[in-house]
Amino acid sequence: MDGWLSEVQRRPVLYMFCSSLGFRLLHWLLRGLPRPAAVDSPWKNWKWQNLSVSMAHSLLTGTWAILCVFQYPVILNDIYSFYTPLSYLLVVISTGYFIQDAGDIIFSGYTRESWEFLLHHVLVISAFLYTVLTKRYTAGAVIALFVEVNSVFLHLRLILKLAGVAKDSLIYSINKLLNFTTYVIFRLGAQFYITWYIVYNYALLDHGFYFLVAMMLMNIMMLIYFHRLLQADFFTRRSHQNGTHKFVQD
């Protein structure tokens, strides 16, 4: 195991490529699975498949990130220089997923409908690539992947909507509350903690300006998504403009 992890650290680009291929293979395998009758258009079919792969990534990396911190709590105190082989592997695998998903958005023809997610992916990929190639900010990337705990419920919310599950159903209501709670704790909490750490230790960090700007942009996006989520699930829902399909508005 240690020898293999050392090999990953010597050839991270190769293993990122393997991760991308693995998630792309999963994307292909999911094509043959049955889908609800409500998934009845090319857009909904692509969205269902994309969300299913994203769900697999979230379940894997969200759990992995939490376990990394339970094993090494020092991750929370040294997001710049601390890393372990397993936490490094987590970032490598997750980077491969985001590269694959960005490619899926671009080549599917739904870039306009998903441009906000694509922008998010570009920011994440650039930050994670820096981590993979320099082994800096590995702990920070692990904490950033706490958001995937929330993504499990966020993806499930969209899957339920695609399947035509009523908003007043028990499963949707339970997931709605879990989605709200994990959004605040694992998504906003993780984002704001990393932002605070960068600001507090700014003078000691390499390329601190870039990471601070990237975090601020993602913070703004997260708050906008949170507002839309509250509007959609807890307040009067505003109608889509011109029927435009968008992940974040759904």
Image (cartoon, rainbow, N blue to C red):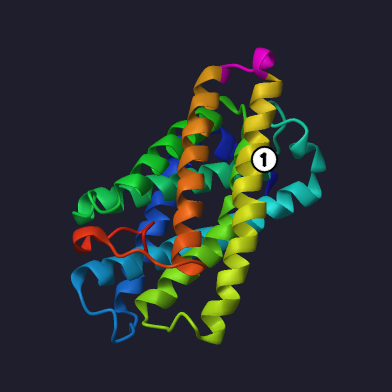
Residue 163: percent from the left, percent from the top?
37, 81
Q: Is residue 11 visible?
A: no
Q: Quadrant of residue 80?
A: top right
The quadrant of the image that shows the C terminus is bottom left
Q: Is residue 160 visible?
A: yes
Front residue of 45 and 61:
45
Residue 199: percent from the left, percent from the top?
65, 23
Q: Residue at x 30, y 78 (%)?
A: 32
Residue that lies at the very extreme toward the front in this rendered image: 236
Front residue of 42 and 182:
182
Q: Is residue 245 left or right of residue 151?
A: left
Q: Residue at x 35, y 72 (%)?
A: 30
Front residue of 125 and 232:
232
Which residue type carries mark 1?
Answer: Pro
Which residue is disc 1 drawn over? Answer: 85
Q: Is residue 105 left or right of residue 233?
A: left
Q: Is residue 93 left or right of residue 111?
A: right
Q: Secondary structure at mark 1?
A: helix
**Magenta stretch, residue numbers:** 202-208
Q: Quadrant of residue 43?
A: bottom left
In magenta stretch: residue 204: yes
